[in-house]
Amino acid sequence: MARREETTRMCALTRAEKPVAELIRFVLGPDGVMVPDTDAKAEGRGVWLSLNRELVTEAVKKKVFARSLKCEVKLPEDLPGLTQMRLEQRFLGALGMARKAGQLTFGATKVRSLIDAGSLIALITATDAAEDGRSKMVGPLKALHYAAAEQGIEGFDVPHFELLSSEQMGLALGLENVIHAALTNGAAAQSAVEKAHRLALYLAKPTETNTGRPAVDGVLLPEEQDERREIHG
């Protein structure tokens, strides 16, 4: 049975109750090792934590897993890093499915055309993209949001993700390099957006002046200070 979107769980570290979309489950395997269950489908005893790398690191230090399960557990050498890798793999896998479904477009010219037409549901930029190339995509995307706001279009939201290198995306998609890409309408593309949001949330580092949204480079900053943040208009 599919989990209802409104289902909540308690973070074992902070004790805050949150929607499962903002949490990640860790499961105790038959070998006694605690591993990330990124899809929350694995059988076994589980522990829920807020979807944030710093909090996972803190949970390891404070031995939250053993305390929650009331038993001795083994942890991988770098559980926060392993969790990030699993989230990246889910995102890359979803991009591959979107590509097969014809819902992922590559190349600066094609992506820019989609932005100008307002025909994308997410913009993806490699972390090693040149600053001028990034600006040529981010500027028009912001203009698209401003235009939607002026027209009174509610719910218009085209996020910008900058989470992986061009090499990472290229290897996963069977291409030499991927600098600029865009997701278009479709179930496969929507799945990729959801997985990108989870990875961005995991990498986010809250600050005293955060806007409450994960930045594309993993840092929460005021919008006027970080044009590369995840854009929501």
Image: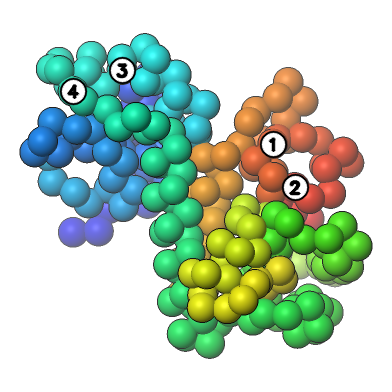
Q: Nearer the viewer, mark 1 or mark 4?
A: 4
Would you name the residue on which mark 4 appears?
A: 73
Which class describes the residues within 10 Å of circle 2: few (<14), some (14-19), or many (20+)? many
- Callout 3: SS: helix
Q: In which quadrant of the rendered image does the N terminus lie? A: bottom left
SS category of the residue bearing label 4? loop
Q: Are marks 1 and 2 in contact (CB under 8 Å)?
A: yes
Q: Are marks 3 and 2 in contact (CB under 8 Å)?
A: no
Q: Residue at x 53, y 87 (%)?
A: 102
Three-letter amino acid code of the residue under disc 2: Arg
Q: Earlier in the sequence, mark 1 or mark 4?
A: 4
Real-space CA distance between mark 4 and mark 3, rounded to the nearest whole angstrom: 10 Å
In this figure, which colouring scheme has been used for the structure?
Answer: rainbow
- For marks 4 and 2 on the same chain, the one whose residue lies earlier in the sequence: 4
Instruction: Tell me the tag on residue 219.
Output: 1
Give residue 18's quadrant in the image: top left
Which one is earlier in the sequence, the residue at label 1 or at label 2? 1
